[in-house]
Amino acid sequence: MNNHIAIVTGGLGFIGTAICVELCKLGATVIAVDKADQEIAANWQADQKKLGYNIGFSFADITDLESTEKMIDDVESRFGPIGILVNNAGINRDSLFRKMSLEDWDTVIHTDLNGLFNITRPLINKMCERKFGRIINISSVSAQIGQFGQTNYVAAKAGVHGFSKALAREVAHYGITVNTISPGFIDSNMVAKIPDNIKEEIIKQTPAGRFGKAEEIAWTVAFLASERSGFITGANVSVNGGIHMY
């Protein structure tokens, strides 16, 4: 993975950090993309540097096309042509659909689904011209099984894989792959908010008998980002401990 420039949206988050670190270990030049302020980003970079990982940072709000265009220009001017894009950023605003506000619906769809357009569209023609690209989109097991109280999130994350399949067909002959990863329940800040009794029930329903690790998502990203994965495109890789199989 040497000489490849990789950007990871939501890069300062729990899973995003693990992805940045794994790609960095494999020799990529990694830039975490996030809308965190400069102080938070600088502290995060300092923490990673202490651990031996020199990871760049570029600001972008993925809900804003102009912001993502500026970010791509910034990254390519400072580091070089982007070859790997990991669309990891996402949010949830859970509630019963009959009580869901339009704002909560729009916010999740705009971030988790429209954000893919905003960051991929300004980059895809560059990848086509260079005849290489690896695009990895993070979805969720919730999109595969449906999840109580998450109609907005499930709709968006199901759309993520539809996006991946359609784009994969369009750009495969340019040497670009587009794949989806659908994590199960990962031991993260989001899962930490789940009540203990529900956590216990989730673990009971998971054949592996545990929550996943952020590193396990990162290893899967690294596999799909590899030059050796050029014949895998339009795929949805489940990393869920067996809670959903098909």
Image (spheres, grey):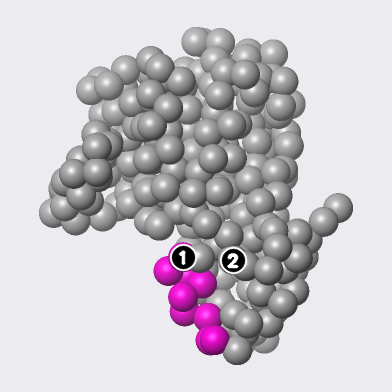
- In the image, residue 220 sits, relative to residue 138, either above or below, namely above
Residue at 36% of width from left, 32% of height from top? 24
Nearer to us of marks 1 and 2 is 2
Q: Position of residue 143 (x, y in %)?
A: 70, 60
Secondary element at image label 1: loop
Mark before the other along the chain sequence, 1 or 2: 1
Determine the CA span between mark 1 and mark 2.
9 Å
Residue 242: image quadrant is bottom right
Q: Position of residue 38 (x, y in %)?
A: 16, 50
Magenta residues, as a range? Answer: 188-196
Residue at the spot of label 1: 188
Camera-side residue of 156 and 187: 187
Secondary element at image label 2: loop
Camera-side residue of 107 and 45: 45
Q: Position of residue 112 (x, y in %)?
A: 53, 55
Residue at the spot of label 2: 211
In the image, 240: left or right of 104? right
| Residue 104 shows in the view | no
In the image, 46: left or right of 48? left
In the image, 223: left or right of 145? left
**Number of residue marks:** 2
Camera-side residue of 223 and 163: 223
| Residue 73 magenta-highlighted | no
Farthest residue, direction top: 130
Q: Which mark is residue 129?
A: none
Residue at 42% of width from left, 27% of height from top? 26
**Label 1 sits on what residue type?**
Ser
**Label 2 sits on what residue type?**
Phe
Specify few, some or many for label 1: CA neighbours under 10 Å numbering under 14, 14-19, or 20 or more: some
- In the image, residue 144 sits, relative to residue 28, either above or below, namely below
